[in-house]
Amino acid sequence: MAFTIAIDGPAAAGKGTVSKAVAAHFGFAHLDTGLLYRAVGAKVLAGVEPVEAAKSLLAQDLERNDLRAPEVAQAASKVAALGEVRAALVDFQRAFARRSGGAVLDGRDIGTVICPDAEAKIFVTASAEVRAERRYLEDVSKGHETSREAVLADVKERDARDMERAEAPLKPAADAVVIDTSTLSIEEAIAQAIAAIEARHKA
Ligand code: CDP
């Protein structure tokens, strides 16, 4: 049985945490599609041309331990605006989405472009300030040197680039359930996502 759950949203909204928990709850496989763009961004920082980097992406490129660094996130959002880079990553994502046993994919355009027919779609969001504070604490815990101001500026810059780009801009699919996690605990956000998916599944 194939069953696709699309989870989209802006930077640091909690997509990753919600997606992992949803996948564990339903026993589905999980793909963090942001890692694909981060891996391409990391290769570009190392001097590879963006489209070549996307076309030659290997599974081991997703295991680099520097992919969560703030400069890699910025490079990712720059390469993610290129149509040819996005096109090179479509087939892999769609094949993952339709694997038997069910799949959760999180990203920016899963419900709108990659899997418009996904059985369930969630859009996880939160205010820029709340998202920046969460990412700041995450960055500091990972040993990245940064400041609250720098993280907020990074989040706002990436959001603007992700929402304003011509190719697969960040926006909720018309049939997505929007969950604003600004005032929710992690447990509440996960519970709302699972309830929304179960409601959709029964419909
Ligand atoms: O973890 P965070 O939400 O900060 O970022 P991410 O999901 O790892 O994505 C990094 C960047 O990749 C984003 O800023 C987007 O520009 C891009 N991306 C995208 O364009 N499409 C996706 N499906 C996933 C990520």
Image (spheres, helix red, strand yellow):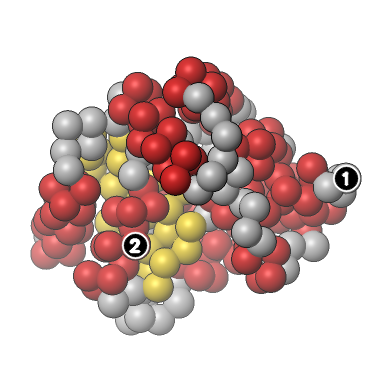
Q: CA distance from mark 2 to mark 1?
A: 32 Å
Q: Amino acid at mark 2?
A: Lys
Q: Nearer the viewer, residue 41 or 114?
A: 41
Q: Residue at x 33, y 74 (%)?
A: 28
Q: x%, y% of residue 89?
A: 65, 56
Find out if the beta carbon at label 1 lies less than 8 Å from the nearest ligand 1 atom.
Answer: no
Q: Residues within 10 Å of mark 1 (few under 14, many from 20)?
A: few
Q: Which mark is residue 20?
A: 2
Q: x%, y% of residue 67?
A: 62, 51
Q: x%, y% of residue 25?
A: 22, 70
Q: Nearer the viewer, residue 170 or 131?
A: 131
Tell me: residue 161, above or below residue 20: above
Q: Residue at x 53, y 64 (%)?
A: 94
Q: Is residue 159 visible?
A: no
Q: Secondary structure at mark 1?
A: loop
Q: Would residue 195 appear left or right of 67 to someone viewing this image?
A: left
